[in-house]
Amino acid sequence: MLLAVDTATQTASLALYEETRGRVLGEESWVSINNHTVELMPRLARLFDQQQIAPEILTGLVISLGPGSFTGLRIGLSVLKGLAVARKVPLVGIPTLDVVARPHMTQSLPIWAILQAGRGRICAGFYVPQKGRWRRRGEIQLTTLEELCKQVTEPVLFCGELDHRDAEQIRGTLSVETSVATPAAALRRAAFLAELGWERLARGDSDDPATLSPIYLQNPQIDG
């Protein structure tokens, strides 16, 4: 049984994933107004209670590593590091933009995955299919939507933390064909985080809880 936790931004999510049968047993996603500290543990306890599952049966832990809010990332990572050490189960960290892009990898367009970074900035990652697998091309960017649109010269899909004003800006700025994921399709879900984590765990790959650290694009934080 895998537990996946994502507190990288104001969009937070939890999931329990039964890896042996490949199914999501429970999931909760919500918008936290920078209140992860008091919200995470009660929601975790409720998720375990709903599925009548005890933490003792966990076989893996998956955490969203950012980029994102300094406080949000620290809270989620601290909780899962504690569980990993206490329960002696493997821990895997996954870049948050990988989770944003994951549900859109069945379509054919290249993907720009977006996270809001505060003060009009965004974090963006570009994903393309390579040798049958989707991979991020280049580094994660800390930029603005306006500057990002200047880089787009081919049809792409935008997904992630974009509201209707952002979608209108994209469509009004770009002359090439673009697609913008709807709010429901763009929601960052911990079930996709769990799938990504399980792919690594199934290969025998995990991270050291003592050294695993969040991804920050500026010091000390990206404001969420």
Image (spheres, grey):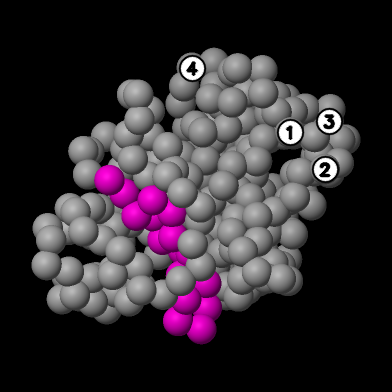
The stretch of residues the image draws in magenta is: 110-126
Circle 2 SS class: loop
Residue 33 in percent (x, y) is at 57, 75
Crowding around mark 3 (Cα neighbors within 10 Å: few <14, some 14 to 19, many 20+) is some
Residue 47 in percent (x, y) is at 60, 44
State how far apart marks 4 and 1 are (Cα): 24 Å
Circle 4 SS class: loop
- Assess whether mark 2 and mark 3 are in contact (beta carbons under 8 angstroms): no
Q: Nearer the viewer, mark 3 or mark 2?
A: 2
- Assess whether mark 2 and mark 1 are in contact (beta carbons under 8 angstroms): yes
Q: Amino acid at mark 2?
A: Thr
Numbered circle sitting on residue 211: 2
Towards the viewer: 141 or 197 = 141
Q: Earlier in the sequence, mark 3 or mark 2?
A: 3
Q: Amino acid at mark 4?
A: Arg
Circle 1 SS class: loop
State how far apart marks 3 and 4 are (Cα): 22 Å
Q: Earlier in the sequence, mark 4 or mark 1?
A: 4
State how far apart marks 1 and 2 are (Cα): 8 Å
- Residue on which disc 1 sits: 207
- Residue on which disc 4 sits: 21
Residue 113 in percent (x, y) is at 39, 55
Residue in the image at 46% along x and 26% along y: 23
Q: Amino acid at mark 1?
A: Asp
